[in-house]
Amino acid sequence: MAIEKWIQYGSMAAAILMFMIKRKGMKKYIPVGFFASYYANIWCFLAMNFNWWNFPTRIFDKPDDISWPVNFVVVPIMAMFWVRYIPRGLGRQISWAFLLTTLLTGFEYLAERYTGLIKYHNGYDWYYSYILWFFSWFVWYWFYKWLYKNND
């Protein structure tokens, strides 16, 4: 099995394992996971149409506009964990967002450079992903706050 498949299966397994370990109290955050999946798919749709990036190696050999493990498993679980454990205070939230964004963009950069998981095109580069990841954390959090505005 190619390294790309191992990374995809491994990332899904790690996300699902973390979810299973911390599943108690996560039911409230499931709508955030669905929204994050929808959000990720919209960005992949835009990327496909503007030829920003594609996913040459996939688990399912269907059109290469989305990464199933990322959009339907990893991103929703990351969003749910982010919203559940987001620190209080804007300064700490921004610090955590920078830390997580740096880690994810670093992984994405290495994956783009050394594997066939993702390929950038048409002037798209890692710093666009950095900006997209950074603001995505807050979009997911704001969605949660909007959804439960009368309950929190």
Image: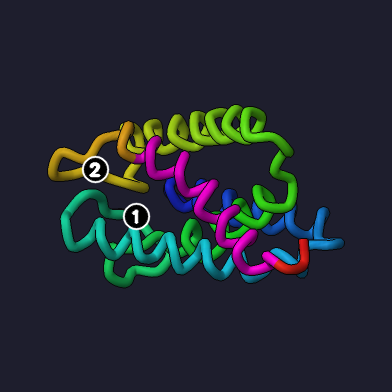
152 relative position to 38: left or right: right
At 77% from the left and 60% from the top, the residue drawn is 152
9 relative position to 107: left or right: right
At 34% from the left and 55% from the top, the residue drawn is 57
Residue depth check, mark 2 versus mark 1: number of the one nearer the observer: 2
Image coords of residue 87 (percent x, y): 72, 38
The amino acid type found where label 1 is placed reads: Thr
- Look at the image and tell me whether residue 14 can be seen: no
> Dot 1 lies on which element?
loop
Disc marking residue 57 = 1
Q: Which residues are magenta?
A: 129-149
- Report the magenta stretch's main SS: helix
Q: What residue sits right under mark 2 in the picture?
A: 120
Between 5 and 152, the residue placed more toward the observer is 152
Between 140 and 128, the residue placed more toward the observer is 140
The amino acid type found where label 2 is placed reads: Tyr
Q: Is residue 105 magenta?
A: no
Contact check, label 2 and label 1, Cβ < 8 Å? no
Disc marking residue 103 = none
Q: Is residue 130 magenta?
A: yes
At 63% from the left and 34% from the top, the residue drawn is 90
> Dot 2 lies on which element?
strand
Distance between mark 2 and mark 1 Cα atoms: 13 Å
Image coords of residue 135 (percent x, y): 45, 44
Image coords of residue 7 (percent x, y): 51, 46
